[in-house]
Image (cartoon, grey):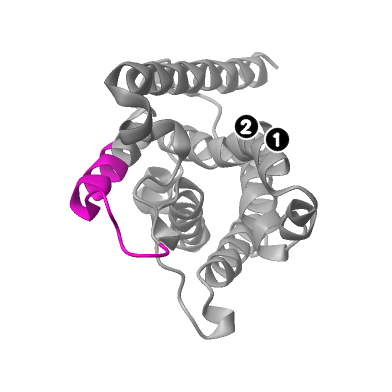
Amino acid sequence: MIFTIERVSSIVIAVLAFVGLFMQAGFHKGKYYLGTFSYYTNLSNLFTMVYQALIFVGGFVGGGFYEGVTGAALRFSLTLMIWVTHLVYHFLLVPDFKKRKGPDFAREWRQFENLDVHYAVPLLALLQWLVCADKAVPWWATLAWLVIPLCYLAFAMIRAWILGPNPKSGVYRYPYTFMDLDEFGIKVWTRNILMAFGFYVVLGLVLYGVSWIFRSF
């Protein structure tokens, strides 16, 4: 078949990610927002867009290319990468934004690009994994996927070091408050990072458990 669930879903997810990023960056308004691609949300959507495009192409090419792109460990890791975007935003950032922004938050939350990159793309990618992906995930993938948030942490800290203590107007030195070394100091910063990675380990185990349940049927 030319149009399988996997192929259709992959191109839909890729297009949604592209549109969301295009709008998040401000291109639809003829501008570019500084720091757009310093956020995990946008980088995870960017990688998801590219990955889903590769799945779409791989569905037609077949062979080793398709098998490599849709390998169980890789797909498991990239699904976790984008799922984290939704979970952290909805359960951690939204309550904080509601307190700080008050009535203005509801208007911002309803914007298409916000719902797109934080809800539509992550949840569709997770659903695609549940329906289409190979569930023979090796146990070590629950730890190997941590390379993704580790690389992001390294990127964020190197970026903060390059920007210096007084970055130009409109650019935040640290993309997320919990990793602000200047504000928290090394002790609290370390605690925050360890707690975040502990959550990532648990999340990996949860999705691995789901894959194990699917393999049991």
Q: Position of residue 122 (x, y in %)?
A: 62, 45
Residue at 41% across, 37% down: 74
Residue at 36% across, 36% down: 148
Q: Position of residue 180 (x, y in %)?
A: 37, 35
Instruction: Give neighbour class at mark 2: few <14, some 14-19, many 20+ (Cα, 10 Å).
Output: few
For label 2, the SS is: helix
Q: Where is residue 23 in the image (x, y as percent from the top left)?
A: 58, 71
Q: Distance between the residues labelled 1 and 2?
A: 6 Å
Boundaries of the magenta span: 154-170
Where 89 sits versus 216, above or below? Answer: below
Asked which quadrant contains residue 71, the reply is top left
For label 1, the SS is: helix
For the question of whether residue 71 can be seen, the reply is yes
Q: Position of residue 49 (x, y in %)?
A: 50, 59
Residue at 51% across, 54% down: 45
**Relative horizontal placement of residue 185, taking residue 28 as reference (left or right):** left
> 12 and 181: which one is in front?
181
Q: For the view shown, which residue lies furthest in the bottom direction? A: 30
> 206 and 85: which one is in front?
85
Residue at 40% across, 61% down: 35
Where 38 sits versus 24, above or below? Answer: above
The residue beneath circle 1 is: 95
Give, as a three-letter code, the residue at label 1.
Pro
The residue beneath circle 2 is: 92
Q: In which quarter of the image is the C terminus?
A: top right
Residue 181 is covered by the magenta coloring: no
* Callout 1 touching callout 2 (CB < 8 Å): yes
Give, as a three-letter code, the residue at label 2.
Leu
Q: Residue 191 carries which label?
A: none
Residue 162 is covered by the magenta coloring: yes
**Relative horizontal placement of residue 16, taking residue 165 as reference (left or right):** right
